[in-house]
Amino acid sequence: MPEAQLHRLLAWTSPAYPTGAFSYSHGLEWAVESGAVRDAGGLTAYVDAVMRRGGGWVDAVLFAHAWEAAGEPAQLDAIAELGAAFRGSAETALESHQQGRAFLQITRRAWPHPWLEAFAERQGTHPVAHAVVMALACAAHGVALVAALNAYLHALAANLVSAGVRLVPLGQTDGQIATATLSADIGAIAEAALATGLDELGTAAPGLELCAMHHETQYTRLFRS
């Protein structure tokens, strides 16, 4: 990958990129509160479920299709509309939409491109999914799809592991072991997402959705989802 594209991808998937990702746990906080996640193994299983059967899987497929459609406004807008609606709870919708809006705003300023400007103008105040916006930015700036999708999934896993380290709590070494374990499967998940059509897209993770819904009324919480 050319250095300029690599630097963009590293910046956009860094925890320092100000999208507010650190403030979301995708229902993990309730899973810890309820005792469903108690250790590094439980954390790894939870994040794996997010990426294989939950919101992470949905985002992976949407990311691939949005990247491919980046130069076709009508097709991209249809994918953006689907991405904004494809959430099972209010908090996971907030998680995706707020990060998507922040990513679009920041990237338009720091790495402007006509495709991003046109997309922002067409969408107006409509909610946009983080996966769709990042895919568009990657396509616009020439970041290869396979690398971009793998990086997106790795950033998702790393963020949830970071939340788990604080919530369980776990040591930093356990957190890195969990990240390494999850990373070993990211390539296969990305490959499967690239081969999945939008008509085939779906999830089968009711436990994750219930955790996110219970989190909405959790009495004491650190995270927004």
Image (cartoon, rainbow, N blue to C red):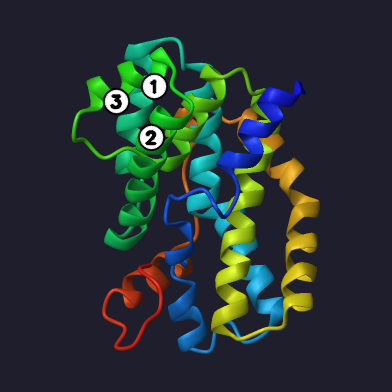
Instruction: State if disc 2 and disc 1 touch (CB < 8 Å).
Output: yes
Callout 1 amino acid: Leu
Image mark for residue 68: none
- Is the C terminus in the top left, top right, bottom left or bottom right quadrant? bottom left
State the image coordinates of residue 142 (x, y, percent, origin top left): 61, 17
Disc on the earlier residue, 3 or 2: 2
Q: Mark 3 points at which residue?
A: 120
- Comparing 218 with 104, the one in front is 104
State the image coordinates of residue 131 (x, y, percent, origin top left): 47, 39
User: Tag 1's secondary structure?
Assistant: helix
Marks 3/2: CA–CA distance: 8 Å
Callout 2 amino acid: Leu
Image mark for residue 104: 2
Instruction: State if disc 2 and disc 3 touch (CB < 8 Å).
Output: yes
The residue under the point 76% across, 54% down is 183
Q: Mark 1 points at which residue?
A: 116
